[in-house]
Amino acid sequence: MPFIDFVSFSGTRVLAVALGVLLAAETVPQLQAQSPSKGEQAPRGAAGDAGSQVPPGQRDKATQKAVEGKDYTIWQRARIRDENGFAEPIEAYSILLPKGWRTEGGVRWVVNAQCPADAIQNRLTATSPDGRFRLEVFPQNNWQWFDDPMMLQNAAANAQSGFGGCPLARPFDAGQFLEQVLVPTELRGATLLSHQANAEMSALMGEQARQNNAAFQAAGVQVQSRPSAEIGRVQWPDGRIGIVLCAVEQTVAMMPNLLNGGTYASYQCRATVKTVLSAPAGAETEAGRILATIVASTRINPAWQAAVQKVYGNIARVEQQENAKRAAIWRQSQQEIGDLQRRTWEEGQASRDRISEGWGQVLRGVETWSAPDGGRIELSAGYNEAWSKPDGTYLLSNDPLFDPNVAFQENWKRLEKQK
């Protein structure tokens, strides 16, 4: 997540966030090489333009000579499935990839996961046909912490008895997680060259978190969200470089301390986006544009999302039954914490598309296009022509004479770039 967020599930929660976050057929687009020079605008006049003065014969001739990967690029929607979570495989989410990319992995369920939020894991790789570019989406991480020694002791004891919930670890922001966890454990051999906080993404995540927590605040529960987002650069010994996206959400709740009075802070932490795109040295600009389009195009299947929410509702009921067997004080505290974890995940799903698009805009690698049906899509920047097919395939070009309807004898619709 997308990278995801999800999915980054996510961005976001339990699984759409583990996405914290992609599929397959021919050449990798040379995005940078095809972009017009600064200030240059490609002439209009492609098929479908009102008042076009380009003779049909000239347009057909230009279309016939067009070469994929040079005169135009194609992005296909890869559909990633959950193979074993339900009675039959179901599409979990989809994402745009350059035509020809191969994918491995997807969504899997971890049976009897001690931390319910980690029960759904999204581990995905996507590779260009020539191996120059490689996308990796890592599963989200969930952990918890308490600033009260007694609560920490109880949580540790619960973990040993099999009722511990998410692992105990001190809170990290995205920068700390990137330095101390993501790069050392997931990107082994890579050196973190630099990273910087992204205030724009943090603000977007914070706005959504405040909306998600409104229900708790209305009920008198003191909740504070502390989202953070980082973009890092890494390098491997062979010279390859990588762009890393990382987002962490901390939800801090002040809970009543029924053991000794007063309150204590409960920290529920989620690394919702753990995504990296690696590329040869010198190809970082192109890699950034590819990554921006991928993460901005993430779409979660509502049917799958609803099914997952139902599963977590069942988990909540089982947890309540188990809690009833324990001491009343511990039961009440843990139930409130569990409700907080589930609530932030459930409410966060509706914002996943917005978070994904936000990452694309932050990377400055996408532009927004309007579809004939009134929808919109974020596609790789630097192009003046865009077309779409009903199956979710997109074509980008800077040649105003190129018409995919003529080239492929298929039903393509022109998109309009938003100003």
Image (tube, rainbow, N blue to C red):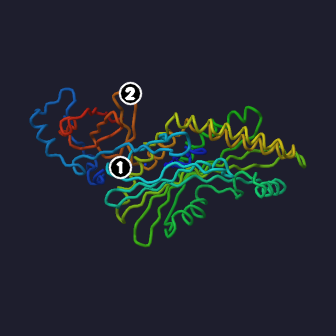
Which x, y percent locates residue 196? 52, 58
Q: Is residue 175 above or below residue 309?
A: below
Q: Secondary structure at mark 2?
A: loop
Question: In the rendered image of this protein, does residue 381 appear above or below residue 220?
Answer: below
Residue 235, image x, y percentages: 45, 67
Badge number at residue 377: none
Residue type, numbered disc 1? Ala
Q: Which secondary structure, mark 1? A: loop
| Of callouts 2 and 1, the N-terminal one | 1
- Between 201 and 131, the one lying in front of the other is 131
How crowded pointer 1 is (Cα within 10 Å; few <14, some 14-19, many 20+) is rated as many
* Residue drawn at the location 40% of the way across and 72% of the way down: 238
Q: Residue 32's spot in the image, x, y percent?
A: 30, 54
Q: Which residue is mark 2?
A: 374
Distance CA(mark 2)–CA(mark 1): 27 Å
Q: Which residue is mark 1?
A: 24
Pair 2/1: label in front: 1
The three-letter amino acid code for the residue at tag 2 is: Gly
Say which of 411 and 322 sits in front: 322
Q: Residue at x 39, y 37 (%)?
A: 377
- For the C terminus, the image quarter is top left
* Residue found 77% across the figure and 58% down from its top: 160
